[in-house]
Amino acid sequence: MRAVVEADRHQPGAFTLVVDGTPQSHVALEDPTYLAFEYVRRIGHGIDLAAPEGEAITALHLGGGAFTLPRYIAATRPGSRQQVVELESELVDFVREQLPLPQGAQIRVRHGDAREVLGKLPPGLKGTVDFLVVDVFSGARTPAHVTSVEFYGLASALMAPTGILAANVADGAGLAFARSQAATLSAVFAHVAVVVDPQVLKSRRFGNVVMFASDAPLPFDRLPRLVASDPTPAKVVDGAELRAFIQSAPVVTDQTAVPSPPPARSIFQVKPGSVG
């Protein structure tokens, strides 16, 4: 693994973490509420709507990167309890050295595979997680073992009755992987919504699809307007439109799970010094 931090030439005090040539996280140290990556901003909207403004929550992040969303929650919801699961301990040390976490933030880091750690978390956490982020990547692909109905079942057991899961799914032409992930989440949770760039939805380009799931109705009345007004506009797909999106896509099991499709190298790969 080769990790570097590149300064954002357009925003002083902001940096991008690049791992093995793939931009993984963007952090604005002077303004942690600024979310540069479009899919991260969409998850941020979900965090904003998950509870009354400023109210502390319990959050679990599977995949750490440069801790962009934990920093966001610490800034917008002071006093929140957060745990981050990250496989690469060397990456965590590197990020903490290069991009220090804010003082006083209650962010605990657990090292290990996301699915394995899920089964080893303290019993007291069960049923308490208000917001659970699944953003696990090996290179530019999501590993198969964190895409199945069994995996999402483990995650759901940790969530509060009104808890929300947010999953970042990357897919390309046809969106077969994203459709199967939506079907799988729908098999575990009562309510699912998808946020996607219309061009990605029309299968015109590779991109990120953010999926929200909960056993309680999602408090997202304002979400369509929020994502439509982003620098890269998106739309919310739910209800009958979501069922049409899923079509006959299969529910993913441990036996049938595959990694997310690889993007073309030209999509995410960058040369050192080119970020920003």
Image: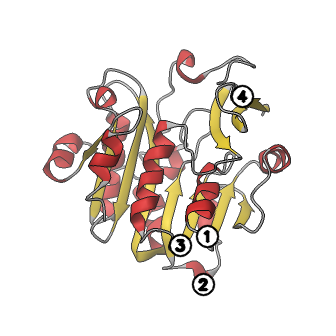
Answer whether residue 254 is visible to the viewer in this image. no
Q: Report the Cα–Cα distance between label 4 and label 1.
A: 33 Å
* Viewer-side residue, 52 vs 204: 52
| Of the pair 54 and 61, the residue shown nearer to us | 54
Where 231 sits versus 160, above or below? above
- The residue that appears at 26% across and 42% down in the rendered structure is 249
Q: Which mark is residue 124?
A: 2
Location of residue 82 by image quarter: bottom right
Residues at marks 4 and 3 touching, judged by CB atoms closer than 8 Å? no
Q: Horizontally, is 5 left or right of 223 in the view?
A: right
User: Residue 151 at x, y = what percent?
Assistant: 48, 59
First in sequence, mark 2 or 4: give its number.
4
Label for residue 194?
Answer: none
Q: CA distance from mark 2 to mark 4?
A: 37 Å
Mark 2: give few (<14), some (14-19) or many (20+) Cα within 10 Å: few
Mark 1 = which residue? 78
Q: Amino acid at mark 3?
A: Ile
Residue 212 percent location from the top left of the image: 37, 55
What is the spatial separation of the Cα atoms under label 1 and label 3, in whole angstroms? Answer: 9 Å
Nearer the N terminus, badge 3 or badge 2? 3
